[in-house]
Amino acid sequence: MLNGFSDLLAFHLFKLVPGTRLGEAIHFFIYDTLKIFLLLSTIIFVVAVIRSYFPPEKTRRILSQKRQYLGNVLAALLGIVTPFCSCSAVPLFIGFVESGVPLGVTFSFLVSSPMVNEVALILLWGLFGWKIALLYIGTGVTVAILSGIVIGQLRMEKYVQDYVYETKVGEMSLAAQTFKEKLRYAREYTVDLLKKIWPYVLVGIGIGGFIHGYAPADFLVRYAGKGNPFAVPLAVLIGVPLYSNAAGVIPIVQALMEKGLPMGTVLAFMMAVTALSFPEAVILKNVLKMRLLLTFFGIVAAAIVVVGYLFNAIL
Amino acid sequence: MVKIQILGTGCPKCRQLTEAAKTAAKEAGIEFQIEKVTDIQKIMAFGVMSTPALVVNGVVKVSGRVPSIEEIKGMIINNA
């Protein structure tokens, strides 16, 4: 059906000729755009409804009774569905730590939440296929679990800013939302999010549609291709200070892939951009002493590098 | 007199919520005072973990999102 509609638009409305380069590029672009936006709106909406059942207060309650390992796994998984915005990182961190969520478990959540989500899943799925999408989600969760376990083992509780432990956290009871309200919020959330990310998604698809077949292997591949063992750490090093959500980084990811960079290097770059950033470091400095902040960034970056090499080896 | 507090550490959404709350209170024609709470200790005392949050007469009404003006009006009127 989507294909038929794309035919109609490209070949009848725009009077392009099938089989020509421009005609096929436009057709591909229309088809992919329809497909991805349809997927995005449906899945963001469904996830938003699911999310309304996992407010941070509930996640905290679930995690506060959990020990290491199981706690890290749960935290990384809950990070996928719990709404999170880096501007809320400070109250969230204090809330978790204060209610007895172990430090390492809290970090598993902080890593997974921005990096692994439905937007990343759909965009990778729509542009590169479901295998890549699942691989990204699976390894993203793994990076979050492992980093959290390592930080927990290092016993760095004393490198949390002192006031965090002295902060009194109050009890809040919001009126429960009816299902109808949940649906309304999910709709608003979906529209808001789509409004914010559509330009990035279009550019990402556009790069796939138009550069496809045009892009010759060039210097990027020569220097950052499979032959260079330092390409993965370099990609992570460049990605760490940059800040973007999954949608914003997609055009770059698409361009790098078209240039022939190996999948592992590109996905490692995407993880580094979404999981860690300079602004996030500034925000987390409010609750972490420098030593723990650097340890956190170092461990997550190292885990992403390992995952990058792993992808390059198996793909 | 309704006391409205906006909890948040200064993200764009906190400003949006402040504006929306002002508009809602004016449209509802209710006497009000509005205060922005940016101190993290005070925010935590309300038990709020996702900002921005809207507090009316000391009770947290919304956390982690910006409600519509109509919705805020309802929350203010019920507490006037």
Image (cartoon, coloured by chain):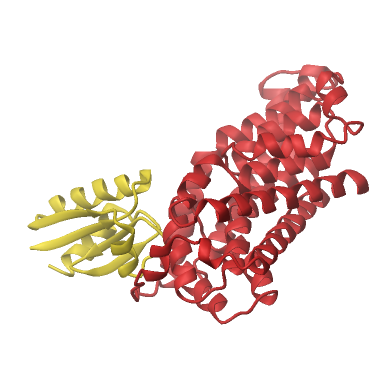
Chain colours: A red, B yellow
Quarter in which the C terminus of chain A is drawn: top right
Taking A23 as reference, is A38 above or below it? below
Q: Residue at x 87, y 23 (%)?
A: A222
> Which quarter of the picture shows residue B34?
bottom left
Side of A292 relative to A85 (left or right):
right
Query: To which quarter of the image does residue B74 belong?
Result: bottom left
- Report how many numbered discs are placed on residues in the image: 0
Q: Nearer the viewer, residue A195 or A246?
A: A246
Q: Is residue A148 visible?
A: yes
Viewer-proximal residue among A238 and A193: A238
Does the rendering let one see residue A35? Answer: no
Q: Nearer the viewer, residue B12 or A283?
A: A283
Residue A243: x percent and y percent?
56, 39
Q: Is residue A287 above or below residue A77?
A: above
Image quarter hosting the N terminus of chain A:
top right
Residue A287: x %, y % from top left:
45, 57
- Hey, which residue is sitting farthest bottom in the picture? A65
Where does residue A58 sit, x and y in percent of width and height?
49, 74
Give the vertical position of A191 relative to B7 (above or below): above
Q: Nearer the viewer, residue A214 or A24?
A: A214
- Left or right: where A115 falls relative to A101: right
Left or right, A81 with respect to B23, comes to right
For image coordinates 92% across by 46% down, the residue present is A313
Residue occupying image coordinates x 81% and y 45%: A308
Q: Look at 24% across and 46% down and name the residue there.
A: B19
